[in-house]
Structure formats: structure tokens, C-alpha cells
Amino acid sequence: MKPVTPNTPEDRLLGMLSKFESFVRHHDVNMSAYKDRVRSGSVGAVIDEFVAECEARNVTLAAMRRALIIAAVVILLAFVWGVVFTGTPLFGRRIALKDTPVSSIELSMTARREITASNLCAQVIQTMRKARDGGPVHACPCLGMLVIHYADGTTNRFDFMPGHRSNRLDMVDISGSGMFSISTGEMFHTLESVGLLTKDRR
């Protein structure tokens, strides 16, 4: 048996609204109210109001989508800036530190401090190994120096210099291997946690 084909404008509009209902349901368009008004005979007015509401909601949704896209782009750019242009560089040659056991580490900034405990020295070495190539050595004034004393009697000295980018500390290897950059916050946090630096001595 063939389905009955709607003949009146009301029937055709009700059929169209039923098919469209699932599509616009998530836009919160009140389809039942429109159907009731169609059944009552206000076909022309219903069509005008329905189209106006859908168009208004589409404009709103489009504006929201544009705003969300712009916000996402801004957040992404801020993230890229924070990762690439601040703190420890993502790429480049890593700092080369000897695997020889460390007997002590001394830091001379506004005061001279030294640590000898192996676990504390290991924390400093672990953090320093995160540094990457910081480019050519610049002529900024030295903030202080850190000297690693190895158990075999050798030493490795690094001069601390302010980085040319936000939240970046440059460490110049006096032995000639170059300059390496690391997050100022991360490096100073480690130095404070092992007792080589206090906040009031930064």
C-alpha cells in the first residue's frame, strides 16, 4: 500500500517540519509550537516566523563559531610563544656534562655556597642536562658562576648570564663548549631546593 501523499499546504508544511525537526533540535527551535500553529491555520505567519528564527539562530551560531576559532588561534599562538620563545629552548645541542661522579658543586653569586651531598649534586646536574644550545656568547654582565667539582679532580665552570628571551638563563661553559640556555625559573628552583641559592639572594 502506497503512503498517502499530503495534498494541502498545511500537510506539506507539517511533513517538512517533521523531517527538519531532528536537524534543528539541537538549536532549541520549538518545533511543536510551530506544528500546533500550522494545524490552527496560520501557515503564512508560521513560515515567516520559522524562517526568521532559524536565520537568527544561524547568525548567532556562526558568530559563536568565529569567536571560538579566533579564541583557539589566540590560545594556540600564546602556547607556541610560551614554548618556543621562553624558557628552555626546544631544539638544539644539549649541554655536555661528564658522567664522572661529582664531589661538590659551588655557586658564587652575591654569596658563595657549596654542596657536597651526592643526591643534591645529582639534582643540579639533572636540571643542567636539560639546557640546550643558546647560540653565540653575548656580552651581557655575568650574574655569577657555578663550578662542578668532579671526583677525578677536574672541574667544569659555567658563568651565569641573563638570557635575551623571557624566563631564560644563559650558562657559558668556560671550557669552550659554548653557551647553553635553560628556564630561569627551573634552574633557580633547583638551586634553591638544594641550598645553593635563596630567594633573597637572586
Image: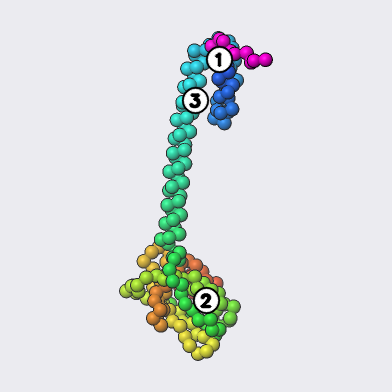
Q: Nearer the viewer, mark 2 or mark 1?
A: 1
Name the amino acid, label 2.
Answer: Ile
Judged left or right of residue 91, residue 140 is left
Disc ID at residue 125: 2
Choose top left, top right, bottom left or bottom right for residue 37: top right
Considering only vertical position in the picture, is 131 above or below 1? Answer: below
**Residue under pointer 1:** 12
Name the amino acid, label 1.
Answer: Arg
Considering only vertical position in the picture, is 149 above or below 62? Answer: below
**Residue under pointer 3:** 54
Q: Which residues are magenta?
A: 1-13
Q: Position of residue 168 (x, y in %)?
A: 42, 66
Please rate how many residues cluster around mark 3, counting C-alpha atoms within 10 Å: few if below 14, some from 14 to 19, many from 20. Answer: some
Considering only vertical position in the picture, is 82 above or below 164? Answer: above
Magenta-span inclusion, residue 57 = no
Report the predominant secondary structure element of the magenta stretch: loop
CA separation in Å, label 3 and label 1: 19 Å
Residue at 49 percent across and 79 percent down: it is 97
Magenta-span inclusion, residue 8 = yes
Q: Position of residue 148 (x, y in %)?
A: 49, 82
> Are the residues flagged by discs 3 and 1 in contact, CB closer than 8 Å?
no
Considering only vertical position in the picture, is 20 above or below 79? Answer: above
Please rate how many residues cluster around mark 1, counting C-alpha atoms within 10 Å: few if below 14, some from 14 to 19, many from 20. Answer: few
Residue at 44 percent across and 58 percent down: it is 82
